[in-house]
Image (cartoon, rainbow, N blue to C red):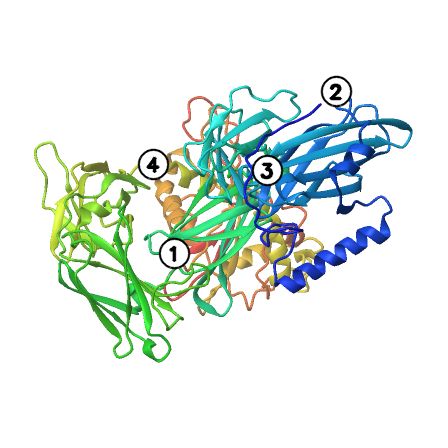
Amino acid sequence: MVSVFEAVPGNMVGSGFQFDYLDPKFPSGGNHSYFFIVGLILVYHTTLSSQASNSGKCSVKTIASEYKQCEIHQDGVHDLECFYKTRGSVNCLWKPGNHASEKTYTLIIQQPPRKYCRRYYNIIDTSEEIAVYENISLTVEVFEKSSKSANCTKAVFRGLPKRMLQCGPPHIVSFRRHSGTLVMNISWRPKAITDYSVRYKALGSLLWNETSSRSQNREICTVKGLNSLLVYTVQIQCVNNETCSECAWSEAYTVPSELTTQPVIVSLEDTDIAGAKGHRLLSFTWKFSAEELHDRYYVTVGKASGEAPCEQINVTKPEIRLNLSYSAYHLNISAVNNVSTSPAVSQAIPQREDMPSMRNEKLNVTVRSNTSLTIYWKDNLIKKYVCYSVEWMKRGHKVNYKSFYENANNYRTLYHLPEALEPYQRYNITLHTRPDKDTCNMKRVNNSENTYGSTQFYFIEGSPVSGPANISSYNVTLNSVVLKWLSIPEEDIRGFLLGYIIYYMEYHHRGASTERNITVDPLFNNYELGDLKSGTAYQVQISGFTQAGEGVRSKATCIFKTNEGSFNFSAVIAVFAVVASVLIFGSPIIKRAKVILWPSIPSPGNSNAMQKMEGPFERELLESLNTLKVEEWDTNSLQVVEKEDVIPASTLPSMMPLLHASEDDVDSPEMTCNWIQGDTEDATGDISPDITTETLPDVQRTNPQSSPFAFSSDYTTMEMFQQGMPPGIPVNTSVSQAMESEPEDTDLTVVKSGLDYIGQFSTSPNSDSKEMF
């Protein structure tokens, strides 16, 4: 098979080997070094490879005699193409035969007008670069021989070198993919190329896309309708023109799939840097689902004010640390491979709130007009810094900025503000210092400035246009209540809030009473209101005030009622619990305390103060007790009275006052009166007392010191009297005993008593009362 290209003869510009210094196969440099390197290459191939190609002169007769048996055959060498690559150089390419093995090739080039003939033999590759005269037509023949066969095949090419210029492959190729679109940006070394074609196929597919896309201009070509998830193979070929007669397809470029998912931020930490004021360390970590498809990440960070630059940082790991000021920033993170960039995940970094504020008076602002202001700072910063930046903004609006140079004063007046200041609007203003002194504009974002301080200001202040909302009450008591409310919105305050005024008055259906008010701190949103009347309804309204004056009161009023005084069930439960505790645990505790605090009192029977009475006593001895007189005031005396007279029942009413008088004397603080008396009732239920008015004057007092029965202690019990009385007279005899009644015709009730009563008399200067037993 023969490939023939006819060319028009022309003039030659040189002979022998001639190469373009710009060819990538050869290094650039001077002529001597260049040919020296080429010589070394030729020597290397000649000495180390016996099959390396050699060149030499030839003649037409020699070719005709040696290669006359070689013919063009369809199974032999074929598709010989030669193209003019650089000045004085031609590249020839061919394809080997189908049945030959251990092939070697011989290439002969002829340019007849000058009788130029050169032969290259022992070629083992399927290409060869040869030197030619570019203005003379040439004929190129390639002969293929096999060591195991005598067959010889050939391929022929003819053409004019200067018109055989082959353009391509592209010098620089870059690909970009997004939304199913492939954008190619190609740079060609020959400037004569103005257009090119592209063909593509999915990776692993056998067929190229039949519709070739053509570029719209010299550099950019766009292919649409691709599958974003597939990997494609792309080839590029320039379009032939008068200069580029040959355009070969480039090598196959592999284009990765698109990155369609965005990274996900896992954590964001905002921490202080030890020993560095006005700096903060921001640590970001994120993850990306298509880890195997990306090469790196782009982290783009810039100031929210829009001040340049917007810095892009390339990282290979999904993490980054930034040293930033307290200003507000915006940050974007994208995954990147050779052809695409994933959608970016955006993160707003708000201004640091815990920065130095106006309370420490580090900054102060004086507004001169709606387009100028002066900012003052406390410290003498000009000793260290000369470059500054000021940022100010009102809530919900874009940040404005201005950088300046200052080396003389600790203040700066800013004129011609980019936006006029508005009245009744609160502005935040921040001052930053910058360490670079050559220019006050930021060179980079990361580690570029410090925050000195921040404060707030108004161009013109006004009074609040609304009051607190959602006023409610809780913890209502008899005379107090806790009020709670929502703060006034900042846009309604229109100034610096100095406090709240709480108005409250008694609420009645027929009208309200006198209004009272109290002022509370602006930082509060609840307050305990006291000194109220129980069971009374109150009406409450709240307003705020600024330097410009008091604002409007809250529209919705709060009405509550204090508790009324009533039975406190919880207090009763508490008292009951205390009483129950005392009843359950009090007796053991009291007994224990008595044992510890008071000594044991001996039994009267074992006391030495008691004189045991044994044997019978004469009646006269007992009667003599009646004759004893008390010569001086006694504390205690004992008298036994025996009476056998019959006491008529008619005298009982006259005795009752005496008995009641004795009972009343018991309440005297200086006298104790205890009665030991056994009463019995007769069959009729009438009580028969032993004591009559006649016996009372006979009661005598006995001196306890002269009496043989005087005791030195205070023990006086029935057991002692039982031991002291004669056996014939029972000590514990009833004071009165009912007797059987007389015949029916009498009205008297006879009471017979062995021992009417035992009395203990106690006398003192203040009282003549008695104690009777």
**Residue 771, percent from left and from top:** 47, 54
* Residue with the most extreme left position: 510
Q: Tag 1 or tag 3, which sits nearer the N-term? A: 3
Look at mark 3 in the image and give the residue it sits on: 137
Q: Tag 3 or tag 4, which sits nearer the N-term? A: 3
Eyeballing the image, is 457 above or below 248? below
* Cβ–Cβ under 8 Å for marks 4 and 3: no
Please name the residue shown 38% across and 66% down the image: 765
Count residues near mark 4 (Cα–Cα under 10 Å), then give few for <14, some for 14-19, many for 20+. few
Q: Tag 2 or tag 1, which sits nearer the N-term? A: 2
**Residue 267, percent from left and from top:** 53, 46
Look at mark 4 in the image and give the residue it sits on: 567
What amino acid is at disc 3? Ser
In front: label 4 or label 3 = 3
What amino acid is at disc 1? Pro
What amino acid is at disc 2? Gln
- SS under mark 3: loop
Q: Between marks 4 and 3, how big is the CA–CA gap?
A: 129 Å
Eyeballing the image, is 681 above or below 125? above
Count residues near mark 3 (Cα–Cα under 10 Å), then give few for <14, some for 14-19, many for 20+. many
- SS under mark 4: loop
Look at mark 1 in the image and give the residue it sits on: 309
Q: Which mark is residue 74?
A: 2
Q: Between marks 2 and 4, how big is the CA–CA gap?
A: 123 Å
Count residues near mark 2 (Cα–Cα under 10 Å), then give few for <14, some for 14-19, many for 20+. some
